[in-house]
Image: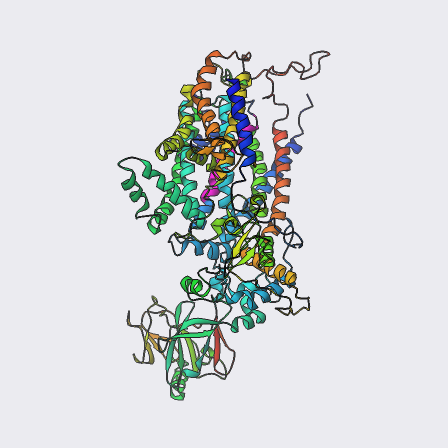
Amino acid sequence: MLRKLFAAASIAGVVAMAVPALAASTQAPLKDDVHWSFESPLGMYDQVQLQRGFKVYKEVCAACHSLNLVAFRNLGDPGGPFWNAKYPNPNENPVIKAIAKDYQVADVDTDSGDAIKRPATSADYFTPPFANIYAARAANGGAAPPDMSLLAAAREGGARYIYSLVTGDGTEAPAGLTIPAGKYYDPWLSGDVSSYYKGDPHKTPVGSFIAMPPPLVDDRVSFDDGTKATVKQEAADVSAFLQWASDPKMEERKQMGVSVMIFLVLFSGILYASYRQIWRNVGH
Amino acid sequence: MDGPADPGRRDFIHIVATAAGIGGIAAVAWPLIDQMNPAADTLAVASTEFDMAKVALGQQVVIIWRKQPVFVRHRTPVEIAKARADDNAPMKDPATDASRVKAGHEEWLVVLASCTHLGCIPTFAQGDYGGWLCPCHGSQYDLSARIRKGPAPLNLVLPDYAFIGPTKVKIG
Amino acid sequence: MSDHPSTYQPGTAIERWLDPRLPIIRFGADLMSFPTPRNLNYWYTFGGILAFCLGVQIVTGIVLAMHYDPSGTGAFLSVQRGIMRDINYGWLIRSLHANGASMFFVAVYLHILRGLYYGSYKAPREVLWLLGCVIYLLMMATAFMGYVLPWGQMSFWGAKVITSLFGAFPLIGKPLTALLWGGYSVDDPTLNRFFSLHYLLPFVIAAVVGLHIWALHVPGNANPTGVEVKSKADTLPFHPYYTVKDLFAVSVFMILFAVFVFYMPEALGKVDNQVMADPLKTPAHIVPEWYLLPFYAILRAIPDKLTGVLALAGAIGMLFILPWLDTSKVRSMRYRPTYRLFFVIWIVACAALGWCGSQEPDGQIINGLAGPVLIDYDINSVTWLSRIAAMYYFAYFLVITPILGLTETPLPVPDSLYTPVLSHPAGVPAGAAAAPETKG
């Protein structure tokens, strides 16, 4: 019996060394060369960064990516890029009203019944670039660009993932990797490129092919606060903006958390003292 | 065993605990109640702006404000005079015409199109007072939308509004 | 109602008037004065914590239902645009409800572990235990349906996978699934009925909890020694001794709850659920919420679909039949060191099953090692670890528990649950003659 066991174990060992690792979804480890102001338990958004990020979204991403869950007034909410304590009601914030007016939204003319376009108000939501998902797919080679309202929440790694993906888009293909036409190599997009790779199977490149061309170049956007618009800066700023878009209540949540934790710790202490007082001199 | 517990000290900690507990419950109760208040998207459409340039003299339009109908009437000088003449007539809810319009814009009457009896929408140019008649139970309003006859208790309600341009108003 | 006669005396005139008409104050006073063993440790506070959790879920749930739209087109928006962004404190109430569900299961698992360890399920408390199993089953159904409501990718696909299981039954499988779905797949009708049932079941749970507490008060609480209450001296009135202890435990529990709600609200969820349900696009990994993972692992471990479903039901069923599987005369594992060892291994097996449920079936346990393939899967795979852990899970109940109860030699059990500490006999410090039970 023991001999059979030994034989089986040695066969297993030989097989283990010969068989390559099973092909599976791979992804490069996320970049950590950026400090995110909101990552720590007490971290908040950097409002100026959110403004720069909004500009990148508006001038670069909005051409293809919708932001359906965000209304113009949300930009003026506490914690948002254009929050101004002088205008606690963001609908009255002149900056918000000005941003909204630049957009056209679909509406109906109540006199004639015709479909018209009118300038947006603060109450309106960001208009999607495509009428529906089929138009989005048709205009983008079959792959609809995802809505960005919850993108940072819908991907492991959040802002860090978006930053890595966007700066990694268009990475030069390692030797042996053939990139299919119309696509770009991105080590941070999770996937399996083994069928496009000829080379050492143990050195299969990580990542996948993305349909989006590298969206950012240096000085693609000019920042109002004069910050140098490198690709890294633009990517970090738009990632922070998208993190805000997916979690606009983060600041309120963390601030409330501080009060609640302090109360609960004190309250637990008081209750413990009460418990000890009641159980004094009682055998148990 | 220690000596008998100090009754004052024994009660104090329990009182503190109870008070802290009640404070905690109140702090928790507030969000549970406040969530029923109008949400941010409802508040965003709390005000409506309207350009009255399209409303010709003697004409009235019905616009929507906070999902309710509002009459915007461009009154003729004859209508204004008739309304003013009745300022001191006996009525259920006395009000002068001047108090129901904005100074310098007396030709514009902006009122909620909801009869103060049970809420039906009155029709214009009916009834004995030249104003509105409510088809449901016969309430009659004059050219200043004041209740003159019928079961309605109050004049048609004036919403909060202000002129933000020569012909533009912001209601709400 | 129980063998404990009521000692309540109506005080005020109103009480004297009400008592013969509807003795509700007597009912409350009897609950508060209920003689409870004086040696209950903190493991016994999870019942109170669970009642707190049920209250939180019901209150936050009713509030969320004011803003939720149970239609396929509106559900995701009503949660992500309405509740999370526009409704005042909507984000907080939703986070309390979603994380509250996880906290509910943390508490129920610790409550069940306590029952297993101290033999609380043994005679005469079998019905109390069965009612608890029913509550657990209702909790799982409620949580499963609740997770579908936000109509994210994981909501939809998790619902599709689990409801499809009913198709495994021969003959009735397909019509039964169509009945559950209300259509040809998980769709609007399914969502609507899940919403209705999700609103209903917590009140059914509350009713069964009422029965559970009634069933507890007939024999009275068990205690860590497993020795029954012999006299009044063994007990203390529930109020104020255990009300304050339970309140303190709830307060500490709330600290853990608050850490999740305010600092890691999505940590226990899946990112895929932040994407609206798409019937045409399957997510890479479909996984249920963490508290259902062990059962998911057992289901997937078995190659045949129907047997897998029966194994899933059997795994839950083991809890129901436990009082009749345990042959030991000794209740508490404090005095059953051998059984305790197997119990710890069982807990490890459950944890392993939970981990396996979160992994891909062909994931490797030891990276880079490839072994022989047995029944479709490599021995060094998540599936085989699930199989081994599942085999131990069933063996623990069906083999180890009955056999060990008869063959084990337990430690000596004390005569009574409480031996008073002698107070200052000359020269002997207080506490010298403490009760012989070891802590455990």
Count of numbered marks: 0
Left or right: B137, with C318 as reference point: left
Q: Is residue C105 magenta?
A: no
Which residues fall within the magenta stretch?
Answer: C41-58
A92 and B80: which is toward the camera: A92
Instruction: Decide which of C371, C21 is in the foreground and name it.
Output: C371
Q: Quadrant of residue A58?
A: bottom right
Q: What coloring was used for the rendering?
A: rainbow
- Residue A193 vs C387, above or below: the answer is below
Q: Is residue B33 visible?
A: yes
Where the N terminus of chain C falls, by quadrant? top left
How far across and how far down the image is residue A94, in percent?
57, 72
Is residue A201 depicted above or below C304 in this figure? below
**Front position in the image: A197 or A137:** A197
Residue A57 in which image quadrant: bottom right
- Place of residue A43 in the rendered image (x, y in percent of width and height, measured from the top left): 65, 52
Q: Residue at x 61, y 62 (%)?
A: A50
Q: Main secondary structure of the magenta part?
A: helix
Can see residue C224?
Answer: no
- Looking at the figure, which quarter contains the C terminus of chain C? top right
Name the residue furthest bottom.
B78
The picture places residue A243, in percent across and down from the top left corner, at 57, 56
x and y percent of residue A255 in the render? Answer: 62, 51
Whether C229 is drawn above or below A108: the answer is: above
